[in-house]
Amino acid sequence: MTYLKDHLVLVVDDEPDLREMLVSELQSIDTKTREAKNGKEGIHIVKSEKVDLIISDVRMPGGNGIEFLDETKKLNLRKPIFLFITAFSDVTREEIHAHGAEGLISKPFDLPDLIKNLEWLCSPTKERYALKPTSQIETEIKINQDPNEKTPFLMGRGGALIPTGKDLLEACIFIQIDITFLNGKKIIGIGEVLWNGNSNTNGEYCAGVEFKYFNDETRDFAIETLEKCNSTAYVPERTEKFDS
């Protein structure tokens, strides 16, 4: 089964060849598509049609991707799902997810990996978070929520800003997470480190982690917590950045 079937996907890029390639691949799996060459054209389509998912470049003349993302999330935080594809590093992964993008793929990309990512994002929430990643777990992070922490634990709509102490976690690794909230409830599962950085000037670090899996005992509470989150950020960013 493909979760993309019959979904309406908007492809926004100023490169006609790339749009054509993506549209052709999506249509081959019975996905409905629309195209735009910049964010201004894209937001017009979003306002006039029921778009389920957006694939967009970041740098485009006539309306860039970040502005397009911001306008889209003002209309609805959760729909359409928004994924960037980009070859440029002038906008960080931390910033992109803080603006609300649910995904980021770097150019050049592997087309099957892109489709797999889109399928995961479009899958029903309970099914998505019940699918345990097969990647090796590199470490375990335990969090006891404490509002007095100088580097607080912050939840987004799809992940969290997690303090990691003296450990600088490598981006793209998978980690075991064990989070205890103030009310005593827990979230236990697996996350992928999207980015890392300094949390203060004392040599302590933090990481932006996307949730990938929740165990059976905590899944319902975890999903409820994410669905109640009204933050624009898919994964929160640091309020202050201390990176050199």
Image: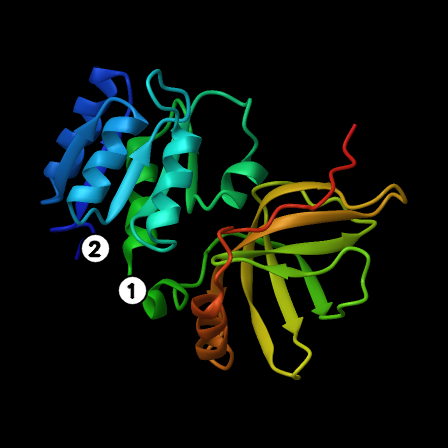
Q: Is residue 65 above or below residue 163?
A: above
The reply to whether callout 1 and callout 2 are in contact (CB within 8 Å) is: yes
Q: Amino acid at mark 1?
A: Pro
Q: Callout 2: helix, strand or loop?
A: loop
Q: Callout 1: helix, strand or loop?
A: loop
Question: Where's residue 26, x and y in %?
Answer: 17, 38
Residue under the point 61% across and 48% down: 208
Locate the C terminus and report the quarter of the image it occupies.
top right
Locate the N terminus and report the quarter of the image it occupies.
bottom left
Give the total of numbered labels: 2
Point out which mark residue 3 bears.
2
Distance from Cα at disc 1 to Cα at disc 2: 8 Å
Q: Is residue 16 left or right of residue 95?
A: left
Q: Amino acid at mark 2?
A: Tyr
Question: Where's residue 29, x and y in %?
Answer: 12, 43
Residue under the point 51% across and 78% down: 218
Point out which mark residue 124 bears.
1
Q: Is residue 30 left or right of residue 238?
A: left
Q: Is residue 235 above or below residue 87?
A: below
Q: Quadrant of residue 15?
A: top left
Circle 1 packing at 10 Å, graded few (<14), some (14-19), many (20+), is: few
Question: Where's residue 31, x and y in %?
Answer: 13, 44
Question: Where's residue 92, x and y in %?
Answer: 57, 31
| Viewer-side residue, 244 vs 211 | 244
Residue under the point 35% across and 15% down: 61
